[in-house]
């Protein structure tokens, strides 16, 4: 009797550099180490039934990765998912799981939007936040915002505006006593893919450095306060409570 | 630009006069800064960044100040190639099991990463903590072949360590090499501090003891070591059996350039350095906690060495000569290592490694038991064996229970019967064709045949015999299916030290190329018969470094200075660079590589004792010229190669009492041949 589970997991620290291609075997080995009855595909080279809705660019951090696991036999989720989580490399952890009921909509349909985070190094924070704030407003007020995406196989022009649901910049204190700028944006997942690099291209006029880190915070549904996470239903705010963080 | 990082400088590398505090034993040490914070932001600019991050399952990351001795173990090639290396993983585990020692790993950065490291002042680093090479006590490098020599120099330079041993002080690590190419370390003599000969398990721990003792004497809290301290360390290392310190030996040459002798110039060091042999492999059941990579490598599997050594006596094979005698692991130990290892790592493939894995005296039951254990699971078994006989097919059928019968590999090595007698590869054409027949009739779809050209005494007819054999095998393949394939894989022979062919002239690349084109031309009409070859020029540097002496060292250094790296990689054509280096340093390739030596000429590795008597090697070389074969001494009489006396073993095989017939389940593989007797198996199914 097969069982499907949907999980939300993180890809942080050193594991940010694992490529999408290598991720399958990282998961398969972790499942084997945890000794869980993952189902395998038929055929001469069977693969563990672990599917990912989409690939995260290498070097991006994430607390908003998802996967669907199909087990060939029932598991005890609270125990077994924890065991799987501890079998994953440091930086990869399972945050939430949900047993998939029969007839549930596809996982991709639950992940309609992504909350992204662009994090700059702790310099120029006040000025940069102010500038991003202005540019964000301009962008949201515009009808179209075309940027050129450079690829080895040629340049492509894409319009980032249709994907943009919400955007906000804020200044955050760092542990070292400095402050840094963080931009959060909710982007639609349907339609042409728009990445934080495209967003950066739409915001800069050659006067904003690339962020130090791009992160996928969570995926789910756009709500006025930010994003309602798909599996837990909790809302991740668009504007972080800076005072709470400092405290 | 707003938000620009204010020039992210790497932690400064301290000058060599200020490094001592980092290398003090235990808690007295100052932990060197990790370079991770500097490396991390650069990684999105390089190819395959996961190779630089570490953090894999079974990595051991110990505190710097919790250890007295600190090793950086290195395979001088990319992570992708070097990570699966068993030698490094064995030493990593046994050193890290010691409370007083710490071992981390390093690999060669690809050229894009190296450029960034140099630009940002990031030294060669370890994967576990991204600590700099210069801070470790030992930089221990395995040399499985000669094509990592320039990478070794590059890593030293990148690691802020003087290239030449003579330029190093107590502020620098000991540069130690081991592995097969360390059996002639002379082209690296000025760059290394010591070479280890033979099996590494025991000698590594003895070297670790010597360094720990030395550190307690010279590098305790606040102590400043005297001017002789480094010399004292080298002497302590030279006193460990199996450790060769090149600085304590000097080559003497005749006026005509030939080597007269390499002599010891330091009182008390042995005139010949003996290799180390682990006599009981059962005591060294490693590696158990194998690293599970998070990025693609050349072999992703749990590997168990099922025996060490080989006495088939193939005259071209350095590995088979220098790793004698044969020492088997017990079947129950193999089974346990595999089961525990598969569970611990999550690998879905198991490799049963050795130089000729089908030769384990109990391989039949080992294979059957493992096939039973993993029947119906997604764990697959592989056995690198290239034996040309029906037994090998039967064994492969057994191991392929869970999978598809795709390809089998056999290594006749030479095309004509005469040539195979010269190299002592005792397989007849009838054997080979019968084996092909068995393979295809039992449902295998593809066979790959390994050959060499450029072997001693080779004539064009011997070369053409490769094509002929390929055509005959292909005709058999076609009988069983139009889509069946045969691939001839042909490489150029490179003579190696400590083999009966150590005296022979290597074929220059243009001659190899001509021979390959003879084969290519002869098989042209047979579409499904494929020929795979290596670039004939690849053997040039390998051959020079394999048999070169200390006079080749300046060329190695110059080639590196001129930019040679990754000499074995197609992406990095370095031959032209090397030719320039040879010209500038006056190294005569013809003289070193393309000249036959005579019996009385001293060889650059004569003072390094692989256990084989030079007189026996010469005799075997002469026998090869008269096409005289030599049986495997596992079941026929000892022929006094010289290895066994002094060891407490002869061959360590057949634990269950004498030779065991492989027992395979009845009816296996449908219509398989009767199992050969043990001597038949060992004599390649004659």
Image (spheres, grey):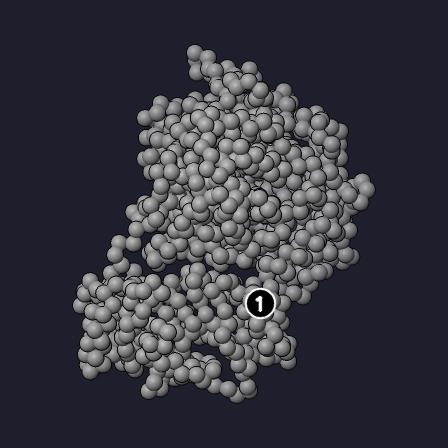
Q: In which quarter of the image is the N terminus of chain B?
A: bottom left
x and y percentages locating residue B676 in the rendered image: 75, 45
Residue in the foreground of this view, choosing between A89 and B588: A89
Residue farthest to the top, as pictured: B255
In the rendered picture of this protein, how many numbered marks are placed on residues?
Answer: 1
Residue in view at x 45 percent, y 27 percent: B226
x and y percentages locating residue A142 in the rendered image: 19, 81
Q: Is residue B416 visible?
A: no
* Residue that badge 1 annotates: A31
x and y percentages locating residue B661 in the rendered image: 78, 46
Q: In this view, does B570 lie above or below A6?
A: above
Residue farthest to the right, as pictured: B657
Q: Is residue A88 visible?
A: yes
Q: Quadrant of the C terminus of chain B?
A: top right
Residue in the foreground of this view, choosing between B669 and A63: A63
Q: Which chain carries label 1?
A: A
x and y percentages locating residue B370 in the rendered image: 70, 56
Residue in view at x 47 percent, y 54 percent: B54
Q: Is residue B114 left or right of residue A42?
A: left
Q: How busy is the neighbourhood of tag 1: few (under 14 within 10 Å), some, or many (20 plus)?
A: many
Residue in the foreground of this view, choosing between B660 and A82: A82
Residue in the foreground of this view, choosing between A213 and A19: A213
Residue at disc 1, secondary structure:
helix
Residue in view at x 74 percent, y 44 percent: B361
The quarter of the picture where residue B613 lies is top right
The quarter of the picture where residue A177 lies is bottom left
Residue in view at x 76 percent, y 48 percent: B662
Q: In this view, does B47 lie to the left or right of B467?
A: left
Q: In this view, does B24 lie to the left or right of B362?
A: left
Q: Is residue B615 above or below residue B241?
A: above
């Amino acid at each position: 009797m097969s069982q499907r589970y949907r999980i939300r997991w993180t890809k942080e620290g050193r594991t940010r550099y694992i490529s999408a291609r290598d991720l399958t075997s990282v998961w398969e080995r972790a499942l084997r180490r945890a000794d869980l009855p993952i189902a395998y595909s038929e055929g001469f080279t069977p693969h563990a039934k672990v599917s990912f809705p989409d690939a995260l660019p290498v070097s991006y951090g994430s607390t908003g990765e998802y996967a669907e696991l199909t087990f060939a036999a029932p598991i005890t989720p609270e125990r077994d998912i924890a065991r799987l989580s501890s079998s994953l490399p440091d930086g990869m952890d399972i945050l939430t799981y949900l047993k998939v009921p029969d007839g549930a909509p596809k996982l991709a349909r639950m992940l309609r939007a992504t909350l992204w985070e662009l994090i700059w190094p702790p310099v120029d924070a006040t000025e940069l936040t102010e500038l991003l704030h202005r540019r964000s407003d301009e962008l949201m007020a515009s009808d179209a915002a075309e940027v050129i995406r450079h690829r080895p196989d040629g340049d492509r022009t894409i319009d980032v505006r249709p994907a943009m649901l919400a955007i906000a910049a804020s200044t955050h204190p760092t542990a070292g006593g400095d402050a840094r700028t963080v931009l959060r944006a909710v982007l639609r997942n349907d339609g042409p893919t728009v990445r934080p690099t495209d967003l950066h291209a739409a915001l800069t006029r050659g006067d904003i450095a690339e962020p130090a880190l791009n992160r996928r915070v969570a995926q789910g549904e756009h709500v006025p306060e930010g994003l309602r996470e798909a599996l837990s239903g909790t809302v991740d705010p668009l504007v972080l409570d800076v005072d709470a963080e400092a405290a | 630009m707003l938000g620009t990082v204010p020039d992210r400088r790497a932690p400064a590398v301290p000058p060599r006069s200020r490094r001592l505090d980092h290398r003090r034993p235990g808690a007295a040490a100052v932990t060197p800064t990790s370079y991770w914070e500097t490396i991390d932001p650069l990684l999105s600019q390089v190819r395959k960044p996961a190779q630089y991050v570490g953090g894999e399952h079974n990595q051991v990351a110990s505190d710097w100040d919790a250890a007295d001795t600190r090793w950086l173990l290195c395979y001088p090639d990319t992570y992708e190639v070097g990570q699966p290396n068993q030698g490094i993983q064995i030493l990593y585990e046994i050193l890290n099991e010691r409370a007083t020692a710490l071992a981390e790993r390093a690999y060669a950065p690809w050229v894009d990463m190296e450029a960034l490291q140099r630009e940002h002042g990031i030294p060669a680093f370890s994967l576990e903590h991204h600590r700099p090479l210069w801070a470790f006590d030992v930089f221990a490098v395995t040399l499985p072949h000669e094509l990592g020599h320039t990478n070794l120099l590059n890593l030293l330079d990148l690691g802020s360590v003087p290239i030449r041993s003579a330029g190093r002080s107590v502020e620098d690590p000991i540069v130690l090499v081991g592995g097969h190419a360390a059996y002639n370390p002379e082209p690296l003599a000025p760059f290394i501090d010591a070479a280890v000969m033979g099996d590494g398990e025991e000698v590594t721990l003895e070297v670790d003891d010597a360094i720990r003792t030395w550190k307690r004497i010279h590098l305790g809290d606040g102590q400043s070591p005297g001017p002789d301290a480094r010399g004292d360390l080298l002497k302590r290392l030279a006193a460990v059996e199996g450790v060769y310190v090149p600085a304590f030996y000097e080559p003497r040459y005749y006026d005509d350039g030939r080597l007269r002798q390499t002599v010891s110039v330091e009182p008390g060091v042995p005139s010949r350095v003996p290799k180390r042999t682990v006599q009981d492999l059962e005591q060294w059941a490693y590696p158990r906690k194998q690293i599970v990579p998070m990025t693609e490598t050349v072999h992703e599997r749990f590997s168990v060495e099922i025996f060490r050594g080989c006495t088939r006596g193939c005259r071209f094979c350095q590995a088979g000569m220098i790793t004698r005698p044969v020492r088997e692991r017990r079947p129950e130990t193999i089974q346990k290592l595999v089961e525990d290892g598969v569970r611990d790592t999550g690998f879905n493939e198991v490799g049963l490694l050795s130089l000729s894995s089908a030769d384990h005296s109990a391989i039949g039951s080992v294979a059957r038991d493992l096939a039973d254990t993993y029947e119906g699971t997604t764990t697959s078994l592989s056995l690198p064996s290239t034996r040309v006989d029906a037994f090998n097919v039967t064994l492969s059928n057994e191991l392929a229970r869970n999978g598809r019968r795709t390809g089998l590999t056999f290594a006749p090595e030479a095309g004509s019967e005469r040539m195979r007698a010269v190299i002592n590869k005792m397989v007849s054409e009838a054997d080979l064709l019968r084996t092909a027949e068995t393979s295809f009739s039992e449902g295998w779809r593809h066979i790959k045949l390994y050959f060499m050209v450029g072997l001693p005494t080779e004539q064009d007819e011997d070369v053409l015999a490769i094509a002929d054999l390929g055509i005959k095998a292909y005709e058999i393949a076609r009988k069983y299916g139009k889509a069946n394939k045969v691939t001839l894989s042909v490489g150029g022979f490179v003579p190696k030290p400590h083999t009966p062919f150590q005296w022979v002239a290597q074929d220059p690349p243009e001659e190899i190329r001509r021979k390959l084109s003879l084969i290519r031309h002869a098989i042209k009409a047979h579409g499904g018969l494929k020929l795979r070859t290596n670039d004939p020029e690849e053997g040039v540097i390998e051959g020079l470094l394999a048999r070169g002496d200390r006079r080749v060292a300046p060329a190695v250094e110059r080639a590196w200075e001129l930019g040679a790296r990754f000499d074995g990689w197609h992406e990095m054509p370095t031959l032209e660079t090397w030719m320039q280096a040879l010209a500038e340093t006056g190294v005569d390739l013809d003289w070193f590589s393309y000249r036959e030596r005579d019996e009385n000429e001293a060889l650059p590795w004569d003072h390094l004792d692989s256990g084989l008597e030079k007189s026996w090697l010469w005799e075997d070389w002469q026998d090869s010229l008269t096409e005289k074969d030599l049986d495997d001494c596992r079941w026929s009489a000892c022929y006094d190669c010289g290895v066994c006396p002094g060891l407490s073993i002869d061959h360590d095989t057949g634990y269950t009492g004498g030779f065991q017939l492989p027992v395979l389940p009845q009816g296996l593989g449908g219509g398989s041949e009767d199992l050969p007797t043990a001597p038949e198996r060992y004599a390649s199914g004659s």
